[in-house]
Image (cartoon, rainbow, N blue to C red):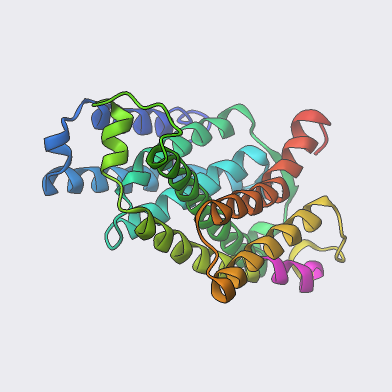
Amino acid sequence: MDILGYLSYSWLTPALYLLLLVFLTLSSQALAQSPVFTGLVRIGIFFILIIHGIQLHDSVFTDKGFVFGFAQDLSLVAWAGLAFYWFQSWFLPIVSLCWMALIFAMVCSVLPGLFPGVLISPDAVSDPWFKGHFIVATLSVGLLSLAAMHAMLMSIQDRALHRQLSIRPNGFLAHWLEDLPPLLTMESLLFSLLYVGFALLSLTVFSGLFFSQTLFGRPLVFDHKTIFALISWFLFGGLLVARWRVGLRGRTAVRWVLSAYTALIFAYVGSRFVLEVILHKA
């Protein structure tokens, strides 16, 4: 059932994201720090997440079957990342990630309207095992996307602290960086995201490896997607082990996170982009 008529209303979600970003831009700093303003922003994000989620569901799980592509993958990743941000913003001081998560979600929500994807399987929509694997994979990449954005924010903050970044005094970026928690707190939050994200990624990777025939209807093939997924898993796992054993931190940890996330994106988005856009293959 197409609740919103995806193709007809594909503009709605990015328009709502843009409207919320304009609202944030025009708000004064004093207003932005008030509890009422924070509550309104959370309500707005929740409302847009519902509409975005309905559109994604109807564009992927269709009457014809499971339709997917790199655009749907990126949009799902952005949706899951923003959903995790919304949930964790109630408990953790991560309001600084709001802009990055919203802009990422807005840009990615445009893509499915431009690249409608291809019919992957007519039967997968009714397979609960496949749906479970698909949901866990989306959640894992979404949470690790939020962790990658957090790592990029830490890199900007670290460069600003060491005077390696030219910032205009009293500018938007200066006020944004001033509102960030201390770098040690940011680092602690980053690893909190990574622990949960790695657990979900492990479930995704190994369910795909051991139940490939059940999930995808074919034996396990070590193609580039599988190889990049395993590289990403080993990199994230190695980072967490290094954190536990030698207390890895700082710029090295940030670079490690971004490298692992790049491999993950190559696995879950890059492969479909090459097939659909460059090679024009279903």
Q: Is residue 257 above or below residue 101?
A: below
Q: Residue 261 in the image: x percent, y percent? A: 62, 51
Q: Residue 4 in the image: x percent, y percent? A: 44, 38
Residue farthest to the front? 162
Q: How many marks?
A: 0
By secondary structure, the bulk of the magenta-drawn segment is best described as helix
- Residue closest to the eye, 239 or 160: 160
With 198 as the anchor, is 219 left or right in this view?
right
With 119 as the anchor, is 133 left or right in this view?
left
Q: Which residues are magenta?
A: 205-213
Quadrant in the picture for residue 159: top left
Q: Residue at x 64, y 34 (%)?
A: 116
Quarter occupied by the C terminus: top right
Q: Is residue 160 above or below residue 253?
A: above
Residue 1 visible to the viewer: no
Residue 251 within the magenta-colored segment of the rendering: no
- Residue closest to the eye, 153 or 135: 153
Q: Residue at x 76, y 44 (%)?
A: 271
Residue 180 visible to the viewer: yes
Q: Is residue 76 above or below residue 134?
A: above
- Residue closest to the eye, 168 or 164: 164
With 147 as the anchor, is 270 left or right in this view?
right
Q: Residue 23 in the image: x percent, y percent? A: 24, 29
Q: Residue at x 49, y 32 (%)?
A: 107
Q: Residue 233 in the image: x percent, y percent? A: 68, 63
Residue 207 within the magenta-colored segment of the rendering: yes
